[in-house]
Image: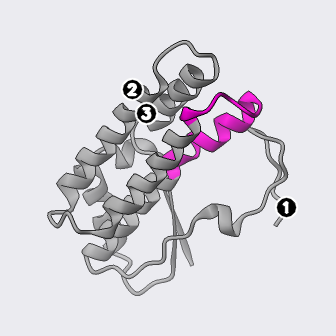
Amino acid sequence: MKVFKFGGASVKDADSVKNAVEILKGFKGEKLLVVISAMGKTTNALEKVVNDYFFSKGNAHAALKEVRDYHQQIMEELFSEKANPVFDKVNNFFVEADWMLDEKPQHTYNFVYDQIVSLGELISTCIVSAYLKQQGCSNIWLDVRDVLMTDNTYREAKVLS
């Protein structure tokens, strides 16, 4: 099995995603494990959402909308068919974040940070997986939260299984 890791700069926009997929196409038929970082500067943008929300120092919803719009633009460039399920799947991630932002913080900063910032990788992997499928590359998208268990030391969790 080969393992590929694509960092944020290598999936920062639609052309970069297309390039990453072209690389993976070169290994069609082989067993691959593909790890994708958050796209571009998404982690920084989501950290701003966390800080705006937790410290009530900005407009967290507006900051999240910027992140949503950035990913929406990438998806629109990658998928000509707006009925592609990736649009709903990605939207659902943002809806969950919006719901969290509607309430006053109920947990520690580190808990909130992990819940919001982790969306970057969930969204990017979802988009890349859908684009791979569109390009004829069979793959299975895994929500890492379902397969990798950690303790609850937020921001410094230890892997349990």
For residue 47, above or below residue 151? above
Mark 2 or mark 1, which is nearer to you?
2
Residue 116, x across and y down, in percent: 58, 40
Q: Earlier in the sequence, mark 1 or mark 3?
A: 3
Principal SS element in the magenta part?
Answer: helix
Magenta stretch containing residue 108, yes or no? yes
The residue carrying mark 1 is 160
- Label 1: few (<14), some or many (≥20) within 10 Å? few
Whether the magenta-drawn stretch holds residue 33 is answered as: no
Helix, strand or loop at label 2? It is: helix
Q: Which residues are magenta?
A: 101-121
Where residue 64 is drawn, which disc sits there?
3
Residue furthest to the bottom in view is 29
| Residue drawn at x 28%, y 66% as measured from the top left | 22
What amino acid is at disc 1? Answer: Leu
Asked whether the residues under the numbered discs 2 and 1 touch, taking CB atoms below 8 Å apart as contact, a structural biologist would say no
What is the residue that sits farthest to the front in this orientation?
A: 103
Q: Which residue is mark 2?
A: 62
Left or right: residue 17 versus residue 9 is: left
Residue 1 in the image, given as x and y percentages of width and height: 57, 79
First reached walking from the N terminus: tag 2 or tag 1: 2
Q: How is the image coloured?
A: one colour
